[in-house]
Amino acid sequence: QVQLVESGGEVVQAGESLRLSCVVSGSFSSIEAMGWYRQAPGQQREVVATITTGGSTNYADSVKGRFTISKDNAKNTVYLQMNSLKPEDTAVYYCNAVIWRFMRRSNNWGQGTQVTVSS
């Protein structure tokens, strides 16, 4: 079984920074890609940033230049550094990992961590 556990969400003021972390644990062969998604109240879940095993990254237009995704392969951990936060960044942030386990590819999610940005 694979588990993803996020941490780092909290209430901050606009303009401040936060760093989210997500640790992948359990039994698996490899991690193909990891990413961060977010869901605001009444809205659909949307991609924020993704990173592949090779380190290629992609960002939503709304966070480009403000957020940075990174990973530590040795720790099976992905990070999201969020700078210049805006009230519209308020959402539950979910970690995602595409994992190979027993020759099967699966999409896995964490439980989410709340980020609230006050104006």
Image (tube, grey):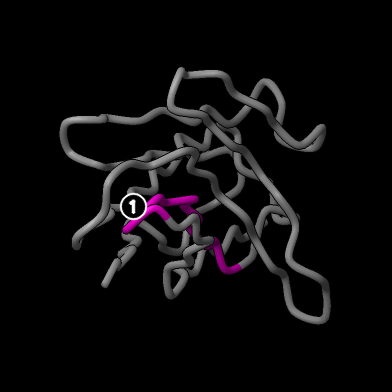
Measured along the vertical axis of the image, is residue 17 above or below residue 52? Answer: below
Which residue sits at x=42%, y=44%? 18
Identity of the residue furthest to the front in this view: 103
- Secondary structure of residue under mark 1: strand
Secondary structure, magenta segment, majority class: strand
Left or right relative to 17: residue 46: right
Can you give x and y, in whole percent of width and height, for residue 98 in the image?
A: 49, 50
Give the quarter of the figure containing the N terminus: bottom left
Can you give x and y, in whole percent of width and height, for residue 71 in the image?
A: 35, 30
Q: 40 and 44: which one is in front?
A: 44
Left or right relative to 67: residue 65: right
Measured along the vertical axis of the image, is residue 11 above or below residue 81? Answer: below
Left or right relative to 43: residue 104: left
User: From which residue to which does the magenta span run?
Assistant: 92-103
- Say which residue label 1 marks: 22
Residue type at numbered disc 1: Cys
Q: 100 and 12: which one is in front?
A: 100
Measured along the vertical axis of the image, is residue 107 above or below residue 40? Answer: above
How packed mark 1 is, by other alpha carbons closer than 10 Å (few <14, some 14-19, many 20 or more), is many
